[in-house]
Image (spheres, coloured by chain):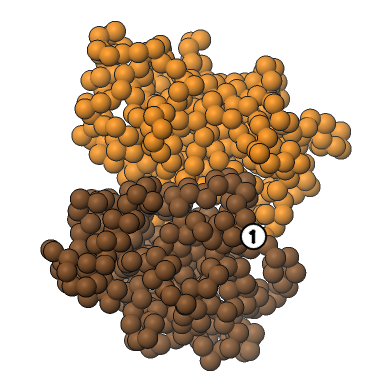
Chain colours: A brown, B orange
Amino acid sequence: MKLATYKDGSRDGQLVVVARDLSSASFATGIATRMQQALDDWNFIAPLLQDLSVALNHGKARHAFPFDPTQCMAPLPRAYQWADGSAYVNHVELVRKARGADMPESFYGDPLMYQGGSDDFLGPCDPALFADTGWGIDFEAEVAVVTGDVPMRADPQQALEGIRLVMLANDWSLRNLIPAELAKGFGFLQSKPATAFSPVAVTPDELGDAWQGGRLHLPLQCTWNGRQVGQCDAGPEMTFHFGQLIAHLAKTRNVRAGSIVGSGTVSNKDRSKGYSCIAEQRALEMIEHGEPRTGFMQFGDVIRIEMKREQQSVFGAIEQQVLEWE
Amino acid sequence: MKLATYKDGSRDGQLVVVARDLSSASFATGIATRMQQALDDWNFIAPLLQDLSVALNHGKARHAFPFDPTQCMAPLPRAYQWADGSAYVNHVELVRKARGADMPESFYGDPLMYQGGSDDFLGPCDPALFADTGWGIDFEAEVAVVTGDVPMRADPQQALEGIRLVMLANDWSLRNLIPAELAKGFGFLQSKPATAFSPVAVTPDELGDAWQGGRLHLPLQCTWNGRQVGQCDAGPEMTFHFGQLIAHLAKTRNVRAGSIVGSGTVSNKDRSKGYSCIAEQRALEMIEHGEPRTGFMQFGDVIRIEMKREQQSVFGAIEQQVLEWE
């Protein structure tokens, strides 16, 4: 099934069930009002949502209405955890190579992951507000999962079974703030502003054979100001699958329901697939020409991130404009 | 007023108002059931809780019962944000000196802060479970605040006005996992397991003149296996006050209601005040003797963290035993 959260003026919005083809939706009234509520009590609530989903897909849901992604908040407008991996090691290798750093062998066995802020996510069509283009505004197109409760010390297989929902993320990054921040040693903070998510979050079964062993085998389209810049396959080159990422997070603590875990920038070795963040393109230019040639985003720029299966949008599109904070 | 969250088997527990002397408490039934709910709608709910608090302090609350800190969850059992500063620069300086790293001048003007996990906090008397003492188990006694909504770009003074509650934190740290994790460049993840908080969170006005300009001028007692090891004053040597820490966090994004911001390990230059984490004592030993002499915590060890004002416990005590995860 497919779920979304509609804006209603509240902090958590209203849970809606969305039809498979994203044409219609229905409020989950009488079942659950908020996404977190469904995640907190998934075994009880999910089957009820599933019944509504079936009715909706058969055109038999009462009170169905046309689905409008611009009315969506992030599926979880705020969450208790956002931990973002960097599972496409090709991306890490390129970015390091561009700045002359070698690639530790351990990076192929021990995932990179950072703890992100999760109190204020952006909806898929919300503008992204920044005070200064000098910060190096960049999109980062990713796949993300929402977990149920995963106990401390869970192994990757157990962790895989804890995945409740899959969605897309735009992990906004301020590239020019990163070097100084990482040099301080405590990870990202100011350099990772509010993240945006796709209109719709879907259960893994909805993805059919595109979902295999914790990897999503579909191309991730990135379109910047109307020009397609990325079409990377999110599946085969994901070095660590989502079960491994979640297990990494659960090594020393429980991972509780509603935690969001990200894949990091989707990246392919085949350069004809393009890029899922500008930093990767700039790294390639640095390696090839000795200097980056593609600039970061400017006020007014629009980024669209979408994933299609048989010509149908799976999660709906993230489509955000960069605007000046005033 | 003083607030706490009682265990009731649910993820968020039950909001209670606690008497100033911590002798009695009353469920906030009819006002708000959960702490986050109060924070989400503070201007409306806080005055109602305040009325109950006044009645309780005058022994006139109906249905009051003896307050029992062992029944407490963390005031926010889970939160949308936990961002922990390192505001006592003396601590940072000592730890760096012990490992032969110098202290960048910028550290006196630009706060260190890391994004922590906030999906699974520990109650004040909950055991702390670890799989391996080889990880270097350490307590970290801190002051923490809970914010209301603080908009992006707020200045330190605005940010200060966004503080709703003050409490104590025990930011458990796995010292032997830290070097490798920080070397990866993405900050703490596995090395910062679930954090614990004091039984009670209090409004700043409750602290009287001990709360001055975003600093809490009271001694923080740390007692390890019955022996007092720390009595550091949390006030004068806090290089960055809480308004500055919150403003640092808000530079590129909104900080939303229920965000928790920590001070980092409380530390004094006067060595007779002792220490608020073992790592600091070990750093001193390293500097003095060329090797650390105090070991980290073992299974069965107990750490007690408390702050008193005129012999009265302000927040109740964090008192946790280290136990082996099985």
Residue A305 falls in which quadrant of the image? Answer: bottom left
Residue B203 falls in which quadrant of the image? Answer: top left
Crowding near the residue tagged with mark 1, few <14, some 14–19, many ≥20 C-alpha atoms within 10 Å: some
Task: Give residue A163's position: percent from left, percent from top.
Answer: 47, 59
Task: Give residue A40's position: percent from left, percent from top.
Answer: 38, 47
Query: Subunit of mark 1?
Result: B
Q: Residue at x 24, y 62 (%)?
A: A52
Q: Residue at x 86, y 38 (%)?
A: B290
Task: Give residue A290's position: percent from left, percent from top.
Answer: 64, 86
Task: Give residue B307's position: percent from left, percent from top.
Answer: 52, 20
Residue A165, compared with residue B276, is above or below; it is below
Q: Which residue is mark 1?
A: B185
Q: Nearer the viewer, residue A244 or A127?
A: A244
Quadrant showing the C terminus of chain A = bottom left
Q: Residue at x 30, y 22 (%)?
A: B27
Residue A202, compared with residue B208, is above or below; it is below
Residue A271, compared with residue A82, is above or below; it is below
Residue B53 falls in which quadrant of the image? Answer: top left
SS at mark 1? loop
Q: Nearer the viewer, residue A94 or A234?
A: A234
Taking the view exactly as shown, the residue that stands out farthest to the right is B290
Judge from the rendering whether residue A16 lies leftward or rightward of residue B80; answer left or right: left
